[in-house]
Amino acid sequence: AQSVAQPEDQVNVAEGNPLTVKCTYSVSGNPYLFWYVQYPNRGLQFLLKYITGDNLVKGSYGFEAEFNKSQTSFHLKKPSALVSDSALYFCAVRSNQGGKLIFGQGTELSVKP
Amino acid sequence: KAGVTQTPRYLIKTRGQQVTLSCSPISGHRSVSWYQQTPGQGLQFLFEYFSETQRNKGNFPGRFSGRQFSNSRSEMNVSTLELGDSALYLCASSLERGTNGYTFGSGTRLTVV
């Protein structure tokens, strides 16, 4: 079965510290992987994607993610967190059955000053 | 270029009524998919349209339906509304069924009373 798991409901980080939001996936074949961020009462904002190529993907607002095929992971990272990074983060994989996205349950990131 | 436009932004309906939500994709995008977001179930796939044809359908009752027009704009309809249909409904557009990514609209917040 195709699925995405975000093992942490919440991640707490101090401003200026590095942050990691974890994601593992299960899909056959080569995955199309995405990270989105959601602020309260807003839609999903694209951060970055892995389609093919370099395992380290750089995205918006200083975020990056590392694709690890052997561990089926796609963790989101940022070297130095900002208070404004506090939001809900979703990892997603494109289904093998066409243009459907399968989402993780989301991770609430809280960055304290 | 203009993003994905969803209308209306907010909607309050009574149980038993029906509702139609609209989504205008990014110009040139032919694929539109819909998602329901609730606190309990997270982000769940409703359906996907590509070139006016439904390509994928999620596990929702027949009260949920949709369509896509020749200009790629899409509508989704929910008939006989139930309290549990209260949710944020998100539309995503993509160029070719997500192989290059998805752009989401701001969503329609539906409240059923």
Image (cartoon, coloured by chain):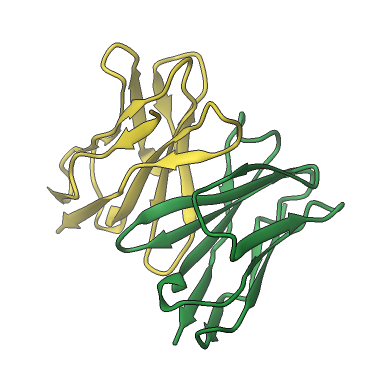
Chain colours: A yellow, B green
At 52% across and 23% down in the image, what residue appears? A51
Q: Can you say which quadrant of the picture contains the N terminus of chain A?
A: top left
Q: Position of residue B13 (x, y in %)?
A: 54, 85
Left or right of A39: which side holds B34?
right
Looking at the picture, how far across and down is residue A112, in whole percent?
A: 14, 58
Q: Who's the residue at 50% across and 85% down the image? A: B15
| Residue at 47% over, 15% down | A29
Q: Is residue B105 above or below residue A57?
A: below
Does B1 appear above or below B81?
A: above
Q: Position of residue A81 (x, y in %)?
A: 23, 46
Q: Nearer the viewer, residue B24 or A110?
A: B24
Toward which corner of the image does residue B17 lie, by quadrant?
bottom right
Question: Horizontally, is A23 left or right of B22 in the view?
Answer: left
Single out the residue that lies furthest toward the right.
Answer: B70
Camera-nearest residue between B81 and A77: B81
Residue A36, compared with residue B16, is above or below; it is above
Question: A55 left or right of A24?
Answer: right
Q: Position of residue B9 (x, y in %)?
A: 57, 75
In which quadrant of the rendered image does the C terminus of chain A lie?
bottom left
Q: Nearer the viewer, residue A48 or A91?
A: A91
Label tally: 0
